[in-house]
Amino acid sequence: MKIAAIDIGSNAARLLINEVKVNNHVPEFIKLNLLRIPLRLGMDVFTLGKIGEEREKMVIDSMKIFSDLMKIYKVDHYRACATSAMRDAKNGKNIIEEVKKTSGIDIEIISGDEEATLIYENHVAEGLDKEFAYLYIDVGGGSTELTFYENGKMKYEKSFNIGTIRLLNNLVTDENWNLMREEIKKNITSKKPIVAIGSGGNINKVFSMSKTKDGKPMTLAHLKKTYKELSELSVAERMTKYNLREDRADVIVPALRIFNNVMSWSDINKIFVPKISVADGLIHNIYSKLYES
């Protein structure tokens, strides 16, 4: 069976295609293709309140490409979800209708809470030590999703309108930060030591830059050091020194600022970075629903 997930975020759109093979009732998810297109919808939406003509055309053209790829791979099931930027765009619904007409793709706009839940669909916590509590931190262009687990159960989840594109455009206020800090201080507490699980393209890039071995955590001290080093460089210098794409070099610093704040406020000093994303969560979500039915 082949399953595809489309995640249209504030920074980029992703198409993930997996083949699922089941052995003794245990599914194996094999990645066939992952395509990322830096649409940067948040650049328009968070400043203008809508998606401009140029980026609207990029969305429509990208979805045609995604549709064609799904046909080529003979995808059996798919789900397409849009997050923060499309949620906030005045013309979001019109663009979704146009995408349906031109490519046949049905896009759902999902809430921040649904986004947080999809991250958990990756079932990473099932393989982790029960002696710890876990805070999932998913940093996107428009929002940050926090999901807190203790003893294998979700204790708290919340979406905050603090994201990398919003920070680049100076659209995150002291009030936004204060709300996040208060929520964390009130809700992210445990008698067990708490560790973080990070997701999103930026933390994955920081992890690969750190040369940390897979399965090992990075420390908050390392994130703070990396933030300081990158903050002192221009976008062009970051691109040259660390071999970063431009659309990664500008957002990686605000992403690190978010991770550093969240971890500091929740007294967490270690973060694991498994390769998980909303798209991966969507694949697992589709499979789970098919399996249940």
Image: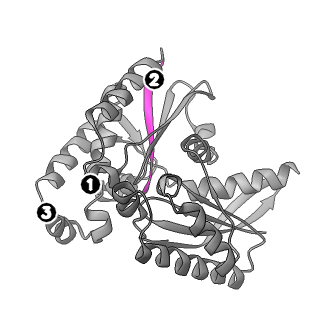
The circle on residue 188 is: 2
Position of residue 66 measured from the top left corner of the image (x, y, whole percent): 60, 77
Q: Which amino acid does label 1 sit on?
A: Leu
Instruction: Say above or below: 284 vs 123.
Output: below
Check disc 3 and report the residue beneath it. Answer: 234
Name, please, the residue furthest toward the top. 191
C-alpha span from label 3 to label 2: 35 Å
Hey, what amino acid is under mark 2? Ile
Which residue is denoted by mark 1 in the rendering?
Answer: 168
State which region is magenta.
192-200
Q: Label 1: few (<14), some or many (≥20) within 10 Å?
A: some
Point out the frontmost of discs 3 and 1: 1
The structure residue drawn at horizontal position 61% and vertical position 59%, both measured from the top left corner, is 81
Element on which disc 1 rests: helix
* Secondary structure found at label 3: loop
Q: Residue 120 lies in what quarter of the image?
A: top right
Q: Is residue 3 left or right of residue 144?
A: right
Is residue 199 shown in magenta?
A: yes
Graded by Cα atoms within 10 Å as few (under 14), some (14 to 19) or many (20 or more), the crowding at tag 2 reads many
